[in-house]
Image: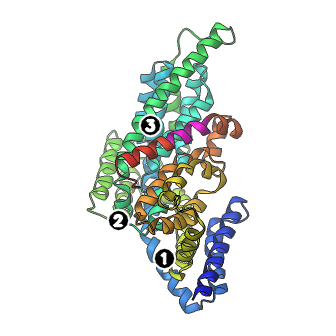
Amino acid sequence: MEEISVWLTIVGLLIIFSIVGLLISNKISPIVGMTIIPIIGAFIAGFNFEELSGFLAAGSEQVMGVVIMFIFAIVYFGIMQDSGLFNPFIRFMILVTKGNVIIVAMATAVIGMIAQLDGAGASTFLLCIPALLPLYKELHMSRYLLLLLVALSASVINMIPWGGPAARAATVINMDLIEFYLPLIPVQAIGAVLILILAAFLGLREKRKISKKVAAGEIAISESVNILAIADNFTKKQNEEMAVAKEQPRDVEWRNIANLVLTILVLGTMMAGLLAPQYAFMIGVAIALPLNYKGVDQQMNRVKEHAPNALMMAAVILAAGVFLGVLNESGMLEQIALTAITIMPAFVVPIIHIIVGIFGVPLDLLTSTDAYYFALLPIVDQIASTQDIASVSTAYSMMIGNIIGTFVSPFSPALWLGIGLASANMGKHIKYSFFWLWGFSIVLLGCAILIGVVTI
């Protein structure tokens, strides 16, 4: 029996290291890696087709609800973005800054949080950077401060169920997604307050830097900043983007109000547990399409527009189901954890989830999001569970510690988009933002421990 356990440990580690290594080196896609490698590993470990079929069925069943939710949630919020639901608020936030550097920094944080409500980092950068970069240039503020604030704000909001990390974590520990998310709402609220405080501090620091440059004669500040022109330019760009699309939203005054009410209803029924997330968003899409677009062709073309993003994420989650099914059902994961406990210092084991959470942001620079959640989280969870630490507590610790680093990692495609839009440099962004984001993640993890979301 002992020999079989050792063999399962070896094969399980080979599967995990192979997937992580290939993902980090960008040699293979998550879909290919998390599907093919575990299946090969199962055969090497001595399992037959019948047993493998059971592993795959169990893994698929574990992730199916999340897959359906992702498809409809991404399409739903894509429709909301297309119809301009968030544009009036962003214009308003630009106007209220009135050229005050500190208020601009705080408004940037608020805009970043609102823009990330669709769960798509790419659209957040597309909305925020072009809208705010002219204002930052006009005030001689650093574009790297803009990137830092958008990255931080988007990361905290990205804890939402359709954001990605929460779905991955809930999938790994086989927990209902909404049940997993609800305790995170206070953490997000604390995070939002801390972001505004940090934004005010960084804004004050930026204001002092600008004052020093003015005093040294390096820059000259205009007597007045035309905030209205910047806000109008944002509105103009958004209207131009909508005009380029073949499908035009219904030209009715009440469209945004109706979309806002619908969004509140969809999220409300989901959070209250009246409907499972996948069905809430499915119904939401079915209502949003005719509400915003005329005719079947226009409606289906909007679905086609957002289908690639939706299906890509769904495919990754399904592949993760194969990976988790093989490792869990075969007993490999349990054997890896038991082996790790025997060689790990005794004082580390009871707080392993906290330690990994603290190093979550640096780990984001060393590993991809998929590798972190689908390869590292299961091992840490198995080790922590031997100390009677709830799986959900381990998932919260690792997620809160890691998620803040999402948009400082070179593995994030959305960040590369943001870097391009800001005409910035990835290395300089990491140098400027890394320690602020890491420090923020540790503080937020500490707050989660204090309010009991993460237990020790």
Identify the residue at horizontal 43%, vertical 29% (top origin): 93
In percent of width and height, residue 401 lies at 51, 49
Classed neighbour count for the residue bearing mark 3: other residues with Cα under 10 Å, few (<14), some (14–19), many (≥20): some
Coloration of the structure image: rainbow
Q: CA distance from mark 3 to mark 1?
A: 38 Å
Residue 68 in which image quadrant:
bottom left
Which three-letter amino acid code belongs to the residue tagged 1? Ser
247 lies left or right of 431: left
Q: CA distance from mark 2 to mark 3?
A: 27 Å
SS under mark 2? helix
SS under mark 1? helix
Q: Which residue is mark 3?
A: 87
Determine if residue 245 is in view: no
Closer to the observer: label 2 or label 1?
1
Instruction: Kindly report the secondary structure that dominates the magenta region of the rendered protein.
Output: helix
Q: Which residue is mark 2?
A: 279
The answer to which of 1 and 308 lies nearer the viewer is 1
Q: Which residue is mark 1?
A: 60
Q: Is residue 313 magenta?
A: no
